[in-house]
């Protein structure tokens, strides 16, 4: 989702942008309604967060005039405004309001409202986990190449994407896993490139085709991380929540198969080409003692202490620090069910 933040208070604007970006939203910002109009003309935002000032009412009417091409969810930011302003903002077409200073959890809850409203209006519910769920039924799986390319384009420029499998020999890349909380499968997303193309990509992103190998690996991991965030947001629109792990570097051949799809993404106006790979990978759940938890394991169920308090929710992918902390908190005899990638 794209969020437009319009506020003349830089401190407030920076705080909102920071909250949204850490939750992996795409964000554009403007200091006034004139700048907001420029951003509105460039790309229709899913959500607009708008400070209520003298020109806001007119700007809100302009946003609503564009509803035929897709409705933006408008959240008005209020400071010490009187109650009469609340009636005026709703009359002008606002969907919600938020009192400042904003708390991160409240910001994210309000911005996530359109997704919840879509589910309520359509009568749909979160996925039923009583039966095994097929990741390949998701729209995000069918559109994976376009979903990833759109977000990576924010870093590199636009791509021309086609489903293809013409990568020869071993390629270098980085992968990131996306896990479902209670299912024994995960979606692994990879960014790969042939050696010469990787150097050319380094010239575009790092400004030097002769960048050291470590810098190229960092670049690939950052692209994989961006791809993971794009897929995670797209899955949420289908009422599917996934958790992401850490991107890892790899060198391997790319071989399409029943559960492996490959797209070729050519950076527009250049000869730079990378591969976008999606794989559905089986996992095996196992029960381990808390003291034996390791980085990368995914909790199959909500983790609660002996008194019933929630320690970590299902689907959490453990970091080394989290695994050590859980082991100390619950003790060596406590048994946890986790998923390990097969």
Image (spheres, rainbow, N blue to C red):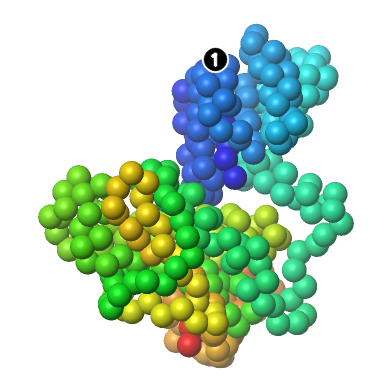
> Mark 1, residues whose alpha carbon is within 10 Å: few (<14), some, or many (≥20)?
few
Q: Secondary structure at mark 1?
A: helix
Left or right of 256 on screen, residue 335? right
Instruction: Kindly indicate the quadrant of the structure image that contains residue 171.
Output: bottom left
User: Which residue is at the front of the view, 205 or 247?
Assistant: 205
Residue at 83% from the left image edge and 20% from the top image edge? 91
Residue at 57% from the left image edge and 40% from the top image edge? 2
Q: Is residue 61 above or below residue 13?
A: above
Counting every numbered tag in the picture gives 1
Task: Estimate the x, y position of residue 270 in percent, counting from the top left.
Answer: 30, 47
Q: Is residue 285 above or below residue 305?
A: below
Instruction: Kindly indicate the quadrant of the structure image that contains residue 130.
Output: bottom right
Task: Estimate the x, y position of residue 47 in percent, counting from the top left.
Answer: 64, 36
User: Which residue is at the front of the view, 306 or 338?
Assistant: 338
Q: Is residue 220 above or below residue 156?
A: below
Residue at 54% from the left image edge and 80% from the top image edge? 259
Instruction: Kindly indicate the quadrant of the structure image that contains residue 72.
Output: top right
Residue 305 shows in this picture: no
Q: Can you identify the residue that label 1 sits on?
A: 34
Task: Estimate the x, y position of residue 44 in percent, counting from the top left.
Answer: 61, 33
Residue at 55% from the left image edge and 82% from the top image edge? 258
Left or right of 144 on screen, residue 274? left
Q: Quadrant of the N terminus?
A: top right
User: Which residue is at the front of the view, 157 or 325?
Assistant: 157
Task: Estimate the x, y position of residue 113 in percent, counting from the top left.
Answer: 72, 44
Residue 25 shows in this picture: yes
User: Which residue is at the front of the view, 169 or 179?
Assistant: 169
């Amino acid at each position: 989702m794209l969020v437009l933040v319009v506020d003349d208070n830089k401190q407030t604007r920076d705080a909102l942008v920071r909250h949204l970006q850490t939750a992996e939203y795409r964000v554009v910002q403007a200091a006034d309604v004139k700048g907001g109009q420029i951003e509105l003309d460039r790309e229709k935002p899913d959500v607009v967060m708008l400070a209520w000032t003298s020109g806001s009412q007119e700007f809100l009417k302009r946003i609503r005039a564009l509803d035929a091409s897709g409705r933006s969810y408008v959240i008005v930011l209020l400071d010490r405004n009187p109650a009469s302003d609340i009636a005026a903002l709703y009359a002008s077409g606002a969907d919600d309001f938020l009192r400042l200073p904003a708390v991160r959890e409240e910001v994210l809850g309000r911005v996530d409202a359109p997704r919840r409203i879509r589910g309520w209006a359509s009568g749909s519910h979160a996925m039923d986990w009583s039966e095994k769920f097929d990741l390949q039924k998701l729209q995000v799986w069918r559109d994976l190449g376009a979903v990833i390319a759109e977000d990576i384009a924010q870093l590199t420029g636009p791509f021309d994407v086609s489903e293809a499998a013409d990568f020869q020999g071993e390629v270098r890349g980085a992968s990131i896993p996306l896990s479902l909380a209670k299912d024994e499968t995960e979606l692994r997303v990879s960014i790969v490139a042939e050696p010469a193309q990787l150097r050319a990509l380094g010239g575009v992103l790092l400004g030097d085709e002769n960048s050291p190998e470590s810098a190229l690996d960092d670049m690939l991991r950052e692209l994989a991380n961006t791809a993971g965030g794009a897929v995670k947001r797209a899955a949420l629109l289908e009422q599917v929540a996934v958790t992401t792990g850490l991107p890892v570097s790899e060198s391997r051949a790319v071989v399409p198969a029943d559960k492996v799809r490959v797209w070729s993404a050519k950076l527009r106006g250049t000869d730079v080409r990378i591969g976008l790979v999606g794989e559905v990978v089986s996992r095996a759940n196992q029960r381990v003692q808390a003291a034996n938890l390791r980085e990368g394991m995914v909790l199959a169920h909500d983790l609660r202490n002996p008194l019933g308090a929630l320690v970590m929710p299902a689907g959490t992918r453990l970091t080394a620090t989290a695994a050590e902390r859980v082991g100390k908190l619950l003790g060596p005899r406590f048994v946890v069910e986790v998923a390990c990638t097969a």
